[in-house]
Image (cartoon, rainbow, N blue to C red):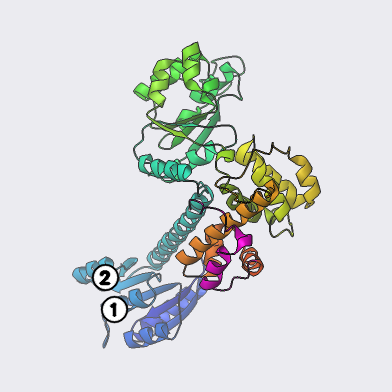
């Protein structure tokens, strides 16, 4: 039996003595109260037992009134009710009010042990659910699409809207833009969020292996198939299946996939019986499926089946205003993992990041941040980047001075982008800097350093800083 602190509340001295001796012999820490008033006073004084055993019939405040007070003072404390024969209605009322269990006097010791164990298990499950919910909330936040770009915000809005519709979603975009992140965001925003999210890379496996990976196989289906194996469709039952790089799938498998999408059933390799599944299918690709259909390498009927909702993620070079936000997020996310002392991206490196075209998109930026955390050498990090032509200017930058260099433009745009975002988040959090740092996905100290560098200590200071010439006065506001 799990060890707990237990408060016994009963006006009968012999019952209190018996329960105290028995529960103490089981290893529990037991305290007693001889009346409801005494029990409520103990709780109001700060005593919080793991469990309460409460008699219903007592002089003064009866058990029902005590239970009501417990649920107001410490609603998480489970209460086992002790009742006598013929008090069925009172017991029912107590259970409706939140009592965890009840025992009818007289009862056997085994009954009491079992009741306590059941309550402990229920409490443990509740705590696990709370923990899972916190992890889910954290995962949803980390799996969210961090962006201030209007196009991406519109994509997130559509993704949330269709998350619970169960229709196929086709996610397109260049390699590294975050197609899998968006797919997970859809899954976590749906009612299937507590069920499996299964990803299959259609480009990573040969045709035969991909078929067995998707649909599974029976024992003896081929040489080496010593045992049956469920496929990814079965593993994703009640959940979500992401078919990554679906444009690489062969026509043979495309036909079988079309059948599954239409009928929600298939046969394993070497099998004869139909397997029914309920898996929400998402697909992603970095190739032009319309061209693939025109060339005959991708089935037109499958294309139309998948293309019910299409979300096209723009590359990072078309949403440069996201670069400072992503840098801060990635910096805080990986700094502890790599035991780095780096607190922020240097202005010189951020300037180069803003001017770089990022052919590998967010994945490439993530790798660059990891390298900078491990080897915080600006020169070395700059060597890793291939500088782009001079016409690769940061988004929304419109310099008025003819002699302004591209470096000046990038630096000012970065500062302006950060300050605009900081202003918005600080206003939304009523200038709670710790909460704002969490919302911005940067460390609290990093936020304080930025405010100190910008000479900002209040709302007026931030507004004043935003209007300084060195802060990008010549730029139009970014679309935050």
What residue sits 54% from the left and 47% below the top?
396
Observer able to see residue 271: no
Q: Position of residue 367 (x, y in %)?
A: 69, 43
What is the magenta range? 454-480
Q: Position of residue 179 (x, y in %)?
A: 52, 36
Describe residue 142's horizontal placement relative to residue 61 as left or right.
Answer: right
Q: Position of residue 463 (x, y in %)?
A: 52, 67
> Is residue 456 a member of the stretch shown in magenta?
yes
> Is residue 19 a member of the stretch shown in magenta?
no
Q: Tell me whether the residue at label 1 lies in contact with that at label 2, contact meaning CB atoms closer than 8 angstroms.
A: yes
Identify the disc placed on residue 63.
Answer: 1
Separation of residues labelled 1 and 2 (CA atoms): 9 Å
- The residue labelled by disc 2 is 94
In which quarter of the view is residue 393 placed? top right
Observer able to see residue 410: yes
What residue sits 43% from the left and 63% below the top?
123
Describe residue 143's horizontal placement relative to residue 165 as left or right.
Answer: right
Q: Position of residue 324 (x, y in %)?
A: 61, 52
Q: Secondary structure at mark 1?
A: helix
């Amino acid at each position: 039996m799990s060890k707990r602190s237990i408060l016994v509340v009963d006006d009968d001295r012999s019952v209190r003595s018996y329960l105290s001796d028995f529960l103490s012999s089981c290893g529990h820490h037991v305290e007693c109260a001889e009346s409801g008033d005494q029990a409520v006073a103990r709780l109001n004084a700060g005593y919080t037992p793991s469990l309460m055993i409460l008699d219903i019939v007592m002089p003064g405040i009866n058990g029902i009134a005590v239970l009501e007070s417990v649920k107001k003072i410490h609603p998480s404390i489970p209460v086992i009710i002790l009742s006598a024969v013929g008090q069925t209605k009172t017991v029912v009322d107590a259970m409706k009010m939140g009592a965890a269990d009840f025992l009818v006097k007289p009862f056997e010791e085994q009954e009491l042990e079992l009741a306590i164990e059941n309550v402990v298990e229920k409490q443990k499950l509740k705590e696990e659910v709370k923990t899972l919910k916190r992890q889910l909330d954290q995962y949803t936040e980390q799996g969210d699409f961090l962006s201030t770009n209007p196009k991406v915000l519109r994509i997130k809005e559509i993704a949330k809207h269709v998350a619970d519709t169960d229709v196929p979603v086709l996610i397109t975009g260049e390699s590294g833009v975050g197609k899998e992140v968006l797919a997970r965001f859809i899954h976590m925003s749906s009612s299937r969020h507590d069920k499996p999210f299964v990803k299959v890379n259609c480009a990573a496996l040969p045709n035969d292996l991909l078929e067995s990976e998707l649909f599974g196989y029976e024992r003896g289906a081929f040489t080496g198939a010593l045992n049956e194996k469920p496929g990814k469709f079965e593993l994703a039952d009640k959940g979500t299946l992401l078919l990554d790089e679906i444009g690489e799938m062969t026509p043979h498998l495309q036909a079988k996939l079309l059948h599954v999408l239409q009928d929600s059933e298939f046969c394993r390799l070497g099998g004869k019986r139909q397997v029914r599944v309920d898996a929400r299918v998402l697909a992603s690709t970095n190739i032009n499926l319309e061209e693939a259909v025109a060339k005959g390498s991708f089935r037109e009927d499958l294309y139309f089946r998948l293309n019910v909702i299409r979300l096209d993620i723009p590359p990072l070079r078309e949403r440069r205003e996201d670069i400072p936000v992503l840098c801060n997020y990635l910096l805080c996310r990986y700094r502890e993992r790599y035991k780095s002392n780096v607190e922020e991206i240097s202005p010189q490196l951020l300037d180069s990041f803003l001017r770089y075209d990022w052919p590998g998109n967010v994945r490439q930026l993530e790798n660059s941040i990891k390298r900078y955390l491990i080897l915080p050498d600006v020169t070395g990090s700059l060597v890793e980047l291939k500088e782009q032509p001079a016409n690769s200017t940061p988004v929304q930058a419109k310099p008025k001075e003819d002699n302004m260099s591209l470096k000046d433009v990038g630096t000012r745009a970065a500062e302006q982008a950060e300050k605009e975002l900081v202003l918005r988040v600080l206003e939304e959090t009523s200038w709670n800097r710790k909460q704002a740092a969490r919302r911005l996905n940067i460390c609290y100290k990093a936020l304080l350093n930025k405010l100190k560098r910008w000479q900002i200590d209040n709302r007026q200071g931030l507004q004043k800083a935003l209007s300084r010439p060195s802060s990008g006065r010549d730029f139009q506001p970014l679309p935050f």
